Amino acid sequence: MRWALVKVSLAVTTMVVLAFAVPLGLVIREMARDRAFSNAEREAAAVAPALSITTDRDQLERVVASAGSDAGMAVHIPAGDGQEAMDLGRQRAAGEDIAAVRKLGRASTTGVAGGSTLLQPVALSTGEIAVVEVYVPEAEVTNGVATAWAVLAGVGVALVLGSVAVADRLGVRMVRPAQRLVEGARDLGEGRLGARVPEEGPTELRLAAVAFNSMADQVVQLLANERELAADLSHRLRTPLTVLRLNAASLGEGPAADQTRTAVEQLEREVDTIIRTAREAKPQTAAAGPGAGCDAAEVVRERMAFWSALAEDEGRKWRVAGADRPVRIPVARADLAAALDALLGNVFRHTPEGTAFAVDVHNGEDAVIVLVSDAGPGIPDPEAAMARGRGSGSDGSTGLGLDIVRRLAESTGGDVRIGSSVLGGTEVRIWLQLDGRAPVSSRGHRGPVRRRRRGRPAAAYNRSRSL
């Protein structure tokens, strides 16, 4: 905006200066020419009275000399009444021009070498017409013109520079509030909720700053209300959790009882984490730095061990591949476990009993792929399934499971795709980026995913789909 104002001011001022300076320069040149020929006419008029009285050479020479223009003046007297033609001074004009002026009886100017001449007719006492020739050098015609043009050019340049300076100051006055508004919006978008914008500058930008600050206050208030609501709702779960823990303690010994107590304890820990996070206004997952993250293979083995008991009760066949060696990924252990639980919970919730499922882990140089596939009926609308809050409509479905998985993958620069599995049902592919390069997003992908990248994951993934 600042440079746009400067350019507009420069263009407008330049056009105005040219519109006035060019005609004014031409007028000054014409005025200098008129001044030079006016002086020549006065010199010719000084000789005219002497010519009307006498034609004596000596007297005329003294008159011409007294006028101080003997070097630039000539007198041409024609022959008549027994008098011979006489020429005083240096003749510069052509003879035909002098004859034409004598015949017409009207003053005229003609160009000669080095300037111009004024030819002024004068009537003699004998009735003949003499011609007074006054030489006007070119330097006299242009005297002062160059100086005047230089002054005009200087004034024009000063006006242009002054207008540019004024436009630049006005641009700064407009741009600075806009820059502060941009910086405030960027800070607010990056999570600095205390970002505010000074309410100053032009009226429009001042109103925009007022609206931005009001919006920021509302965002802070809404986030505070959400944190309080999440903490309150989570705290209400403590009572039914306490009942579940007491009931689980009375189940006695056995694998089912141990798993129930473990699940209740994990649920209590998750509720406590939600309450602490909501109260402290901190994100659940810290940014992964060097050495942060978890072992995806270990988390997969742990969660499959948890879900295997329920799979045996429902007669489901399951398998795990690629989890026999460490696979480091830049996400928190709890987040990966929550994502796997959401996907495996969907398998148990939305497929009939006896439906087989599998989890595959593919490790490579730049990415890790986790595949969760089943032999169920599939997802008719993958794009709708990926939308936050769009559940299947059945009891217990909130529509947040796949959104949790998507946000986990996108936090690493990866993505999530839904396609058809080799088992005949749905396959959810989680692409976890290791080097921070974000691939092209393709939510709601229908059909098999065949995206090739360098390294091992894509090759291993394609081989697994051909089995």
Image: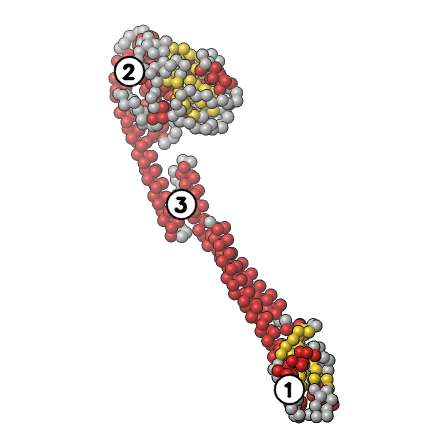
Which residue is depicted at the point 70% across and 72% down? 113
Q: Nearer the viewer, residue 80 or 340?
A: 80
Disc 2 crowd, CA 10 A, few/some/many (<14, 14-19, 20+): some
Q: Which mark is residue 122?
A: 1
Residue, disc 3: 197
The amino acid on which the numbered mark 3 sits, given as a three-letter code, is Val
Q: Is residue 287 above or below residue 42?
A: above
Disc 1 crowd, CA 10 A, few/some/many (<14, 14-19, 20+): many
- Asked if marks 3 and 1 touch (Cβ < 8 Å), the reply is no
The local secondary structure at tag 1 comes to strand
State which quadrant residue 425 falls in.
top left
* Residue 266 shows in the view: no
Q: CA distance from mark 2 to mark 1?
A: 135 Å
* Residue 33 shows in the view: yes
Which residue is depicted at the point 27% across and 16% down? 244
Q: Which mark is residue 245?
A: 2
Which residue is depicted at the point 48% across and 15% down? 463
Mark nearer the viewer, 2 or 3:
3
Q: CA distance from mark 2 to mark 3?
A: 51 Å
The local secondary structure at tag 2 comes to helix
Mark nearer the viewer, 3 or 1:
1
Disc on the earlier residue, 2 or 3: 3
Where is residue 226 drawn, in percent x and y? 31, 32
Q: Nearer the viewer, residue 227 or 60?
A: 60
